Image (cartoon, coloured by chain):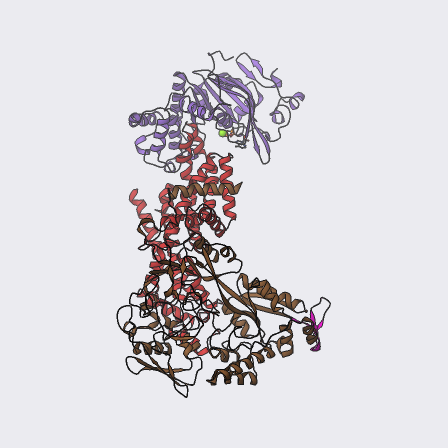
Amino acid sequence: MTRHRNHGLGRLVARRLLVLPVVLVAVAAMTYLLVAVSPFDPMSAYEAGSAGLSAQAKDEIRAAWGMDAPTYLQFLHWLGNVLQGDLGHSRLLGGQPVLPQLGARLAPTAILVGTALALTLVGGLLAGVAAAAFRDSWVDRAIRGLSYVSVAAPSFWTGLLLLWVFSSWLGWFPAGGSANLRARDVGLVDPRYLVLPAIALAATQFAWFAMFVRNQLLEVMREDYVVFAQAQGIGRWPVLLRHALPNALLPFLTLAGVHLAEIVGGTILVETVFSWPGLGQLAVEAARAVDLPLLVGITLLGSVTVVLGNLLADVCYRVADPRIRESTA
Amino acid sequence: MRLRWIVALTAALSLGLAGCSSQPNSSAASGDQVDRTIVIGVGGEPSNLNPVFGDIYGSVYGDHWPVFSSLLDYGQDLELQPDLAAELPEVSTDGTEVTVKVRDDARWHDGEPVTAADVAFTYNAILDPSVATPVRDLLFRSLRKVDALDAETARFTLHEPDQAFLAKLTTGIVPEHVLAGQDLNKAAFNLAPVGSGPFVFDELRPGERIVLTANPDYYGGEVGLERVVVTFVEDESARVRQLETGALDVDAEGLGPQTIRRFEDNPDYRVVRIPGDLLTLTLPTTNAFFKQAEVRRAIGKAIDRQQLVDGLAAGAGRVVSGPFYPDHWATDPSVSVAYDPDAARAELAAHGWKPGPDGVLVRDGERFRFDLIYGHGYAEDAAALAIRDALGNIGIEVKPKALDYAEQQKQVAAGAASLQGLGNAYDPAIDVFDTYHSSLSDDDPSGNVARVESRRIDAAIERGERSNDLAERTAAYHELHRLLVEHGSWQYLMQGDNYYAVRADVSGVEPQVREGHVHGFSRGLLWNLADWSVSGP
Amino acid sequence: MTGEGTPVLEVRGLGVSFRTRRGTVAALRDIDLQVAPGQVQVVVGESGSGKSVLAHSLLGLLPRNVEVSGSVRLEGEDLLGVAPERMRQLRAQHLAYVPQSPATSLNPVRRTASLMAEAARVKGVRRADLGERLPAVGAAVGLDYGSVARRYPHQLSGGMQQRVVNALALLGKPDLVVADEPTTGLDRDRVTATGNELLRLADEGASVLVITHDLDLAAALGGRTAVLYGGRLVEERPTAALFTRPAHPYTAALLAAMPARGLHPIPGQPPELTDPPPGCPFAPRCERVRPECGEQVPAATTLPDGRVWCHAAR
Ligand SMILES: Nc1ncnc2c1ncn2[C@@H]1O[C@H](COP(=O)(O)OP(=O)(O)OP(=O)(O)O)[C@@H](O)[C@H]1O
Ligand SMILES: [Mg+2]
């Protein structure tokens, strides 16, 4: 039976990974298409603060960057280079190759997203379980209230509030950035600088997840198998944690992908508020400047993250739910 | 009640995460060395550090930042002075040849000597059509070629005389021996430059900071700061927070007149004021409403410029009427535009514009109503609303419309009225031709967007450009100033100030006068960064 | 009343109603029932008559949207007001429960062995004894523990699931066993064996309350039988006597509707519980209906061998 299961999972993973390149090419093509119809003009980046470039100057710059060809040809050219492992060069990043530049800029965002994700999952789980366990008590009301507020509050608002309280007022945490600006030989990020932005980013999903856990738990608590577990005299917490929780969390795995995408998207605002050196702001810049190789690079990175995140969630779902596990085989 | 929960929970979470965190501001922690390091906050991350592609903050002036040095440089009064050049360049009598001697003691940060070949390489790179730089078009249309006559002498050959040419020799010079044979558009140098200026490029942490260290072999003498960290903080309030928590020493991006107040009474900071852009209302002649000069002038008269100064610049600004800064030699101090709404109404009535039932002027069933294009921003909004109110007062309905730069350009080229920050603190020849000469009045959005087509204006521009004589040039530009006021398509309204906050223990901060735009490094606040020093820890 | 010693279970005036969006559902009303140690109490009734609600009341498993009146005492201790932790103890040490639907009562993400071991530990089986005890209780209900241990609930047949929950009831030393349809999906010989297991528990001194549709099982169990109709007790007498000479018209109709007795359906619909009409709940369908039946709920009439709630029985 074990071999059977692995076979099913292996097939799932293989299928998704085979589809991934197709998805990525489609995403890249979509990005080219969107940019082709977008109102942004690549020349505006060259003209900012000036009286405007002559038509000839614009033509020369376009030609230098291969932007004089029709968009579909630019796309095909790009695709040809990608097959040789070259994602193109970015005008916004000093004309440097996109791939290594993205690699260098990915780390702070990845650390932020990863921490926020962990905070969301741990915090949301604790809060959701607590709210369900003490249903209708002050604990529950407090957690629900907090969740409504944080759902309603945009992440920049949460971010500013955190900064005001913990940085300006209490002085516990720095006011932005990812490391002490005066320090030499700084590592990737300084944990003290990570705390507030990670909380602000986690707050965007925390409420949803906490309420999901709570409501799902309360629903599952009415299931026959939970009632039966209680009927046998199993304690309140083991019933909650070992019988109700795993079942309550199963549907989350099918939704995790969507929310991963939202967290990734949420970095744009949070990185701005906290001056966090990441990809979020760069993505906006790339779109404005119509820096296609960079924009496509960032978009693809996001797509890969979301696709792989979804795949991971699906694999977990199948491993976690024996009923599905079997039917995939 | 709910707020309390947020605070309590986030406090609990962050406490749990951080354990006991030490003071984030105590920068001396864990062996960080802080002496004579200064942290400067700027707005965005530069996309290119190579001066061939323009100033790292996208300025049109072919500027340089202190990793680089240039042939000439501006002094505190914006007077041109030699930098890499041994002396001011020699201009041939016909004005088409400029010869420059390069000083013999300048060295690249890698130890190689700086030569005339590097100068020729830099400018020829700018002229190379395959190099994607806007500077070629914006500054060097008059330049034909550059030759290195010998190791110390470079000669610029021009297509035609260019009065402003010397002012353009402030472009940072790049090393030929590092860049020769490379595709400049994609050179690794663009994000890891080697220069010959007072500071050596040390590190670029993407999205966060550029680190510079003092150049011990700088030909210009000892550099006061040991280390300069330039950090990119887009958001104004984020910069303020970082200043106030001590993470930043200097805000070089500029703070709004409201924001700066909190630093004015604070003994830890010095507030630096530098005159800024001219707020300008452009009324293109291709727009049906603005065809007659009388109508354009009437609009100008309807705006109380002093009230704009009081309202938008909190009183700390100057009324202007022409394109040059108020104390610039090219400005005719006798010219002004009086606020006279009654005269404006009468002028418009004479052209058939009569108040309709709702007070808005009507002519042949058409209402006097136009869109006012401007750029996004809090200050910009306030200015646009002020114009709306002023013109509403004489029965013109104005619809302010904030747009992105590219869209602004498009609409303005199509004849829309616009509100912009403009101005020239340097030689008028740098841009008056592009802005007002009738030869550039075409559908191309570059140059003469207001479609000024006046022989007398053309003549004044040409006189000002051709002459070598300052008195003659002054007369020409004073004439231009008067003619533009008469023409009315460019309503120069007021000049506000730019405000910067600098920690009080930084010494040597002597801003340049009359700096219009926020240029980042080589002008305005930071122009003499090499002379700055930090007194305390 | 039943004369077999002090009752282990004593239900007095029990009323259970659910607050739902469509009104209050009076699922049980005025239930009086006592079960002595060693006694088997069978409960029968149509679908929806409140049998499972009764079972849940005894174990404190009623949902939150409920209003309960009366009392339920186990060995004199009132179960309705007991603290949650005490209730848990009682369930673990003094109660055993077989749920009506084993298919949904076994946690889908846990293996059989893990479910059984957890229950056994709670019921006081020592860890060291699990290896012996689990196969033993399995064998007692005809379950090959070795072959189901590694399986998930959905991999078991309906009958196997039933036997798993039955086996769980045998783990401790319960004072009260509540079995809600414990023979669903079982073959005939397994039904008999299950009946024997329940009787054995009674022999060991437990009170055994069995809800069933299976008249043969009821007959085999003997003891006493209570009949529920529309949330009310209508008859409560020794099983054998009730089956041969039903005292209540509904009992008679119920017996006639059983497959073994020729499947004569009872005309009409079971009563509406949301807005119960006054009087005897069976009145609208009763062949022997009298005028007072529609007005007044009949009080219990004590018979020599039990009770019946019927105006006609007076
Ligand atoms: N949680 C609940 N909320 C509302 N009504 C309920 C609830 N549980 C049971 N009921 C109602 O109580 C009545 C009795 O239900 P119960 O499950 O006891 O029937 P039963 O006699 O066990 O029937 P069956 O033989 O089909 O199992 C039914 O009308 C049912 O709809
Ligand atoms: Mg039932």
Q: In this view, does B512 lie above or below C234?
A: below
Q: In which quarter of the image is residue B218?
A: bottom left
Q: Please state which of residues A278 and A303 is positioned toward the viewer in this rendering.
A: A278
Q: Please state which of residues C3 and B412 is positioned toward the viewer in this rendering.
A: B412
Spot the residue most to the left: B111
Q: What hue does chain A carry in this figure?
A: red
Q: Is residue C241 above or below residue C147?
A: above
Q: Please state which of residues A25 and C147 is positioned toward the viewer in this rendering.
A: A25
> Residue B35: within the magenta?
no
**Can residue A310 be spotted in the picture?**
no
> Residue B351: within the magenta?
yes
Quarter of the image with the C terminus of chain C in it: top right
Rendered purple, the chain in question is C
Magenta residues (range): B349-368
Q: In which quarter of the image is residue B82?
A: bottom left
Q: How many labels does the image show?
A: 0
Q: Where is residue C237 in the image (x, y as percent from the top left)?
A: 51, 17
Q: Position of residue A123 (x, y in %)?
A: 42, 42
Spot the residue most to the right: B357
**Can residue C148 be spotted in the picture?**
yes
Q: Position of residue C110 (x, y in %)?
A: 37, 36
Q: In this view, does C238 lie above or below B388?
A: above
Q: Where is residue B63 in the image (x, y as percent from the top left)?
A: 40, 71
Residue B405 placement, left or right of B212: right
Rendered brown, the chain in question is B
